[in-house]
């Protein structure tokens, strides 16, 4: 009987220890670093490459992050299509930029958790692959984003833009030359007010069709500046953004 009682005590003690112990799976140190940036994309814009991605708000374990200090941008350059190349092999990548979120360079703009940066150090004919890694104030690197590629072509010609103002709206007219190669998808429209830098993020979410756009979500007494870029799908499926159009200005007229 004593042996049975002793066994019962040991089982009860084990259950108490389990109940009072740590809850949840054990987290390894490599799971406590920032998760990888998401929705990463690279697209030729004029003679440059526009790289954009969303900053993570959680660590690799899925817990909320206290904050990210910045990102490291690495790039690989190739003269031939890197399709089939090892994406996890970083030996051919070179660190080209370390950016701090509280002091971003002029070639980078932030829209919420979305970062858009312009790489102008590219050459037509080459292929570029980009890799993005976030880091914390303690200097700890997070997970690496999936690398993205951009094949740089000769820049597409810029459209010609005109603006016509009225009391309730500004109408933008576009003179677009049909592309010699590829299929015209539409155009992106960029707008700013005052003396601020023109945003890297277009006003529209989807390509605008036709060659006219009516902008009516405007404030009276504000002077607006516009530019545009056409979007062309190449036979390879790559979508290019053209060189930037001329800048036009518009302001709502007084009621007549």
Image: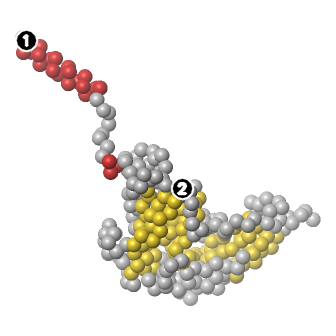
Above/below status of 47 relative to 192: below
What is the C-alpha distance between the residues marked 1 and 2? Answer: 65 Å
Identify the residue shown where x is 49% and y is 85%: 124
Q: Which mark is residue 113?
A: 2
Q: Say which residue appears at 74% left-offset and 73% top-offset.
A: 172
Relative to 162, does residue 72 appear above or below in the rendering?
above
Image position, residue 204 (x, y; %): 63, 65
**Is 169 left, or right, of 186 in this rendering?**
right
The image quadrant of residue 176 is bottom right
Crowd tier of the residue under label 1, counting other residues whose Cα lies within 10 Å: few below 14, some 14–19, many 20 or above: few
Q: Is residue 62 left or right of residue 171?
A: left
Quadrant for the N terminus, please: top left
Label 1 SS: helix
Q: In the shown orientation, is residue 106 left or right of residue 191?
A: left
Q: Residue at x 83, y 65 (%)?
A: 252
Q: Is residue 131 visible?
A: yes
- State the residue at coordinates (84%, 68%): 166
Count of marks, rendered view: 2
Residue extending farthest bottom? 180
Q: Position of residue 154 (x, y in %)?
A: 53, 86
Query: Is residue 35 shown to the viewer in this render?
Result: no
- Crowding at dot 2, Cα within 10 Å, few <14 / some 14-19 / many 20+, comes out as few
The C terminus lies in quadrant = bottom right
Q: 89 or 139: nearer the eye?
A: 139
Q: Which residue is mark 1?
A: 2
| The disc label shown at residue 218, or none | none
Residue 156 rendering spot, x and y as whole percentages: 58, 83
- Location of residue 93 in the rendering, given as x and y in whole percent from the top left corner: 37, 72
Q: Secondary structure at mark 2?
A: loop
Q: Quick one: label 1 or label 2, which is nearer the N terminus?
A: 1
Tell which residue pokes out farthest to the front in this image. 138
Residue extending farthest top: 1
């Amino acid at each position: 009987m004593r042996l049975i009682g002793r066994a019962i005590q040991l089982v009860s003690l084990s259950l108490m220890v389990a109940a009072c112990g740590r809850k949840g799976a054990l987290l390894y140190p490599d799971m406590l670093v920032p998760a990888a940036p998401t929705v990463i994309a690279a697209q030729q814009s004029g003679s440059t490459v526009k790289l954009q991605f969303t900053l993570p708000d959680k660590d690799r374990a899925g817990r909320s992050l206290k904050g990210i200090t910045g990102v490291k941008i690495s790039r690989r350059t190739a003269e031939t299509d890197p399709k089939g190349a090892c994406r996890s092999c970083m030996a051919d990548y070179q660190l080209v930029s370390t950016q701090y979120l509280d002091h971003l360079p002029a070639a980078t703009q932030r829209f919420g958790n979305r970062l858009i940066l312009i790489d102008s150090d590219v050459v037509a004919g080459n292929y570029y692959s980009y890799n993005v890694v976030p880091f914390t104030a303690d200097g700890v690197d997070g997970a690496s984003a999936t690398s993205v590629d951009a094949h740089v072509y000769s820049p597409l010609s810029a459209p010609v833009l005109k603006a016509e103002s009225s009391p309730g709206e500004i109408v933008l007219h576009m003179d677009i030359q049909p592309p010699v190669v590829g299929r015209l998808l539409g155009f992106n429209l960029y707008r700013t007010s005052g003396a601020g830098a023109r945003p890297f993020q277009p006003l529209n979410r989807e390509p605008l069709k036709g060659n006219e756009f009516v902008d009516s979500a405007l404030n009276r007494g504000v002077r607006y500046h516009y530019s545009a870029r056409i979007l062309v799908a190449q036979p390879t499926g790559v979508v290019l953004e053209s060189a930037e159009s001329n800048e036009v200005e518009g302001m709502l007229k007084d009621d007549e």
